[in-house]
Image: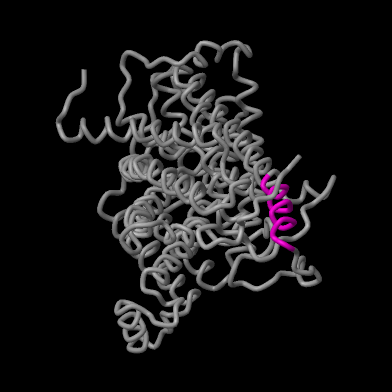
Amino acid sequence: MYRAATRATTSDQRLRSQAAPPPQGRQRLRWYGPGLVWMLSSVGSGSVLFTPRIGSRYGYALAWLALLTAVLMWVMIREVGRYTVATGRTILDGYRDLPGPRDWALWLIFVPQLVAAVVTIAGIAALAGSALMIELPGGQAVYAIGLIVLSCLLVVSGRYSGMEKVTAALSAVLVLAIVATAVRVLPSPGTMAGGLVPQLPSDFDLYFVLPWIGFILAGAAGIMWYSYWVASRGYGGAVTGDGPDARNRSEKRVDPAERERRVHRWLGVMGRAAALGVVGGALIILSFLVLGAELLRPQGIVPEGIDVARDLTGLLGDVWGDWGRWLLLVGIVIALWGTVLANQDGWGRTFADATIMITRLDKDQPAAAGRLLAQVGRRLRLNLTDRETLKNAYAVVVVTALPILVFLLVRQPVDILSVAGVVAAVHTPVLVVLTLLLNRRHLPPELRPNAFTTTAAGFAAVWYGAFAAVYLLNLAGVQLA
């Protein structure tokens, strides 16, 4: 029998002040949306760009790596979702409760994600631009810059949510086409069997593989954003500070024991939604791996530079004919555009929240940096102490202007996104450790991760940390035997 914790309201523990009744029966199906949205967002650069390259170079030898990483990703996104469901706060808001120097955890999130945001958007736009220039007049720069600017306008104008639905639907069509093609070209179900045995190819290249690992199923940013998706969908109830939503207005405040029981059931719904997203995302990854192994590897083609999109569109063209090539071309562009939209909106909100927290703009007494930000805003005639205005400012400068500059300097999508993938792989263990510390320290005992989940999350941190450490040592010239 489930036993409610009696210390849920002590100073070192967090439990949301109000919990909505959990869904029952078929009603639970409508709460699987965040998992599906997260899955479709993972169709971006990790699947479209890096997975066919892995399949072309190594065949199915690293299929086990993709599946293991997917399982670990489920553990990680479920943990950030756990905190949000239990407390009614985003994971970023929770990080500032960790003991130690003021805001140290926020800075550990903020700075690496600034780098990741700029290079990721620049690389995705470069890839989309190289895809459009295959069949349309004009150069890569016109399409890449146009895509970034158009996405920014949609985010700043508040029309992102409508376009999100359109791009998600079209991305779903791309997913169906990719999976159907993979099934058609796969010689037999047992072809991948050898790749399910953990092993490393003799020509294993960590720098070649690490960006793929970093981007599998949305990477470090996807882990953090899952908390925002869970919050925006109202798992467990409204997020603290946003007021009660329509589901809670008629709810009477219940005692901590009942709230904890409700949260416990919400955690089950959230965990299944996360599992649905991971299973779907893993299927997409494996499908692209099949296409790379069966269509590119026999020809000795490993997509490079601005020829990536041209090589990838040949994947469906070889199987379905000209219409298949067009379908993949349109699908790639839509999927990448949707990823840019999600990135600009998601990172804009994340950076705005981090800035408000670091500068204490959400407190009665802002820090000196907060007062300075307010003064700068007055000079620019912008209210930079407002979360939405600050989000739009980040959208214009950090995830629009700076990515355009990086694109103009580099142009090569593989080179740009390789940097982003490495940053994601290095940053992931940091997110895992911070989240695990937070959940173990601040959640009521009955809502904390159990021993198995703690062990799995710890393994995920070690897993990503080992890859990142070996890579950084090699980068520093230290060769490991």
Q: Which residues are magenta?
A: 255-267
Q: Position of residue 47 (x, y in %)?
A: 50, 36
Q: Residue at x 45, y 67 (%)?
A: 353
- Relative vertical location of residue 237 with respect to residue 477 in this rendering, above or below: below
Which of the 4 quarters of the picture holds residue 374? bottom left
Left/right placement of residue 341 relative to residue 380 reads right
In this view, the residue in front, 356 or 459, is 459
Q: Position of residue 224 (x, y in %)?
A: 49, 51
Asked if residue 258 is among those painted magenta in the image, a careful observer would answer yes
Q: Position of residue 337 (x, y in %)?
A: 51, 53
Asked if residue 173 is among those painted magenta in the image, a careful observer would answer no
Left/right placement of residue 216 relative to residue 160 reads left
Q: Pick out the residue farthest to the right.
A: 25
- Please say whether residue 5 is visible from this viewpoint: yes
Viewport quadrant of the C terminus? top left
Q: Position of residue 7 (x, y in %)?
A: 61, 56
In this view, the residue in front, 194 or 107, is 107
In this view, the residue in front, 20 or 309, is 20
Viewport quadrant of the N terminus? top right
Q: Residue at x 54, y 73 (%)?
A: 157
Q: Residue at x 37, y 39 (%)?
A: 425
